[in-house]
């Protein structure tokens, strides 16, 4: 491939990537895996063969990811479902390789390529947030059209009645896209224009049926603000809080239940479980199903805390037909919550707990190490306050959503996280920025 054609390919790829990511994320979130695969192909095609080896450069964070994948593969030895573990780890390996390729590619970008990416973010942000806002406030006409017109998007009657709930994944994607969007909008427009734009974007996220994305973005904004005020203290506090969240995760559900309700007995075996609200803390009734799943998970972790049950075995812990009947009463003896559910439906809906459950403390240590290195990179010497603000926001948003939603190994969710990190690294860790910083330092 000639050099002019290669440069043109990179330019078009970077211009289109943000818009495609946001739009596909809204209407076809599982398409993020396809987008990531196409991105990998475009990156390899747009890179000289003599430079391909730079796409596979490793550092401490990538070595940690590689070791984590090795642990996941080896866990087939003690897994409840060895064949399934070996089969399911293959997409994880593929995701890891794609992430390595695109993130290393992002560090080779120069001025015109970065400008193309920024224009793509601006166009994709305006189009995506406007369309998502219209879908959430109106009749979700585009989603209805896609669902009814194409068999690939076929869904059941319940989802057609509650059509806006099908946009939950799109709202989650919006909460991730918000950070590179903020990064570019704040630099391009005056503050009296950028503030209304960004406020409107947050309001669109708030319109979603799922509270997790809005809560995560809010936590990200608060964390980023604190970090910008004092980077050194902010980094230390953020690192300590993340490590605490990881290592107390197996204990938290038990004590949260005990603090809020009377709590006797265990959930491990399918059974009927009854609690009484103490009235100490106002836990919304809607949260109790998720808390129940986390409590089951934490009690399973107690049984195999070191190496867990094996990679992707959460759904194998209980057989079809196993269920828990959970009843919560107020102080007067009135039933306020009644739940009949699988003890762990597919996965714990908490990535940290899932890693503890399937890979034990060994997996938790690798997760903690990876997050430590990611936080360290966000506070690199070459980064300014705006870089750190967006970087911390992305990390906190992803971490919060991982604590309360989705499974650890859902391919579309892994792909979405990788793509937004790729976009951020393009903006912050590119070659032009490194050259500018190095030339600015007196020798």
Image (spheres, helix red, strand yellow):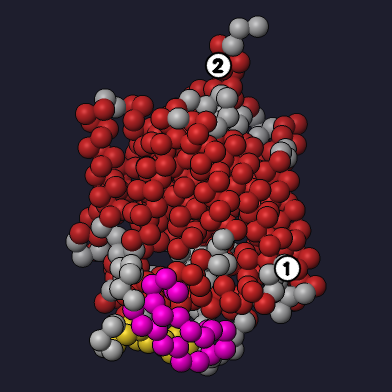
Which residue is at 61% across, 77% downward?
A: 300
Point out residue 51 in the picture as x, y percentages from the top left corner.
72, 32
Figure quadrant of the N terminus: top right
On residue 363, the disc is none
Report the Cα–Cα distance between label 2 and label 1: 46 Å
From what the image shows, is residue 12 above or below residue 437? below
- Crowd tier of the residue under label 1, counting other residues whose Cα lies within 10 Å: few below 14, some 14–19, many 20 or above: many
- What is the count of numbered marks? 2
Instruction: Name the residue rendered at 71%, 34% in the picture.
Output: 54
Secondary element at image label 1? loop
Quadrant of res 277: bottom left
- Residue 37: give x, y in percent of width and height: 59, 52
Identify the residue position indicated by label 1 in the image: 307
Q: Residues within 10 Å of mark 2 (few under 14, many from 20)?
A: few
Instruction: Name the residue tied to disc 2.
Output: 436
Residue at 34% in and 30% down: 186
Any part of residue 411 in sight: no
395 vs 326, nearest the viewer: 326
Q: Which residues are magenta?
A: 257-277
Residue 419: x %, y % from top left: 52, 47
């Amino acid at each position: 491939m000639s050099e002019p054609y290669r440069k043109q390919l990179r330019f078009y790829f970077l211009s289109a990537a943000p818009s495609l990511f946001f739009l596909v994320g809204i209407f076809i979130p599982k398409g993020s895996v396809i987008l990531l695969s196409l991105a990998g192909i475009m990156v390899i095609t747009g890179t000289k063969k003599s430079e391909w080896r730079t796409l596979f450069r490793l550092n401490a964070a990538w070595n940690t990811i590689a070791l984590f994948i090795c642990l996941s593969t080896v866990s087939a030895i003690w897994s409840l479902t060895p064949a399934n573990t070996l089969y399911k780890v293959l997409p994880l390996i593929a995701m890891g390789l794609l992430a390595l390729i695109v993130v290393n590619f992002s560090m080779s970008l120069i001025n015109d390529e970065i400008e193309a990416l920024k224009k793509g973010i601006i166009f994709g942000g305006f189009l995506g947030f406007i369309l998502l806002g219209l879908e959430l406030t109106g009749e979700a006409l585009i989603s209805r059209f896609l669902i009814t017109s194409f068999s690939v998007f076929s869904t059941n009657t319940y989802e057609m009645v509650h059509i806006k709930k099908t946009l939950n994944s799109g709202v989650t994607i919006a909460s991730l896209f918000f950070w590179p969007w903020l990064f570019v909008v704040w630099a391009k427009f005056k503050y009296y224009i950028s503030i209304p734009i960004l406020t409107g974007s947050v309001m669109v996220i708030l319109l979603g049926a799922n509270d997790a994305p809005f809560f995560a973005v809010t936590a990200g904004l608060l964390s980023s603000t604190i970090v910008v005020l004092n980077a050194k203290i902010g980094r230390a506090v953020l690192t300590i809080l993340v490590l605490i969240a990881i290592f107390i995760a197996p204990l938290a559900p038990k004590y949260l239940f005990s603090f809020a309700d009377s709590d006797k007995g265990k959930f491990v075996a399918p059974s009927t479980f009854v609690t009484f609200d103490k009235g100490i803390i106002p836990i919304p009734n809607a949260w109790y199903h998720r808390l129940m799943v986390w409590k089951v998970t934490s009690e399973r972790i107690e049984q195999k805390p070191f190496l867990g049950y094996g990679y992707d075995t959460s759904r194998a812990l209980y057989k079809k037909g196993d269920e828990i009947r959970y009843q919560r009463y107020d102080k007067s003896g009135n039933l306020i919550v009644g739940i009949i559910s699988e003890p762990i439906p597919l996965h714990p809906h908490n990535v940290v707990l899932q890693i503890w459950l399937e890979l034990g403390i060994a997996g938790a240590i690798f997760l903690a190490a990876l997050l430590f290195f990611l936080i360290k990179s966000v506070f690199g010497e070459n980064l300014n306050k705006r870089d750190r603000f967006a970087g911390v926001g992305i990390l906190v948003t992803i971490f919060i959503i991982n604590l309360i939603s989705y499974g650890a190994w859902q391919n579309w969710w892994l792909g979405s996280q990788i793509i937004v990190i790729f976009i951020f690294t393009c903006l912050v860790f590119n070659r032009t920025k490194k050259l500018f910083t190095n030339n600015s330092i007196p020798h």
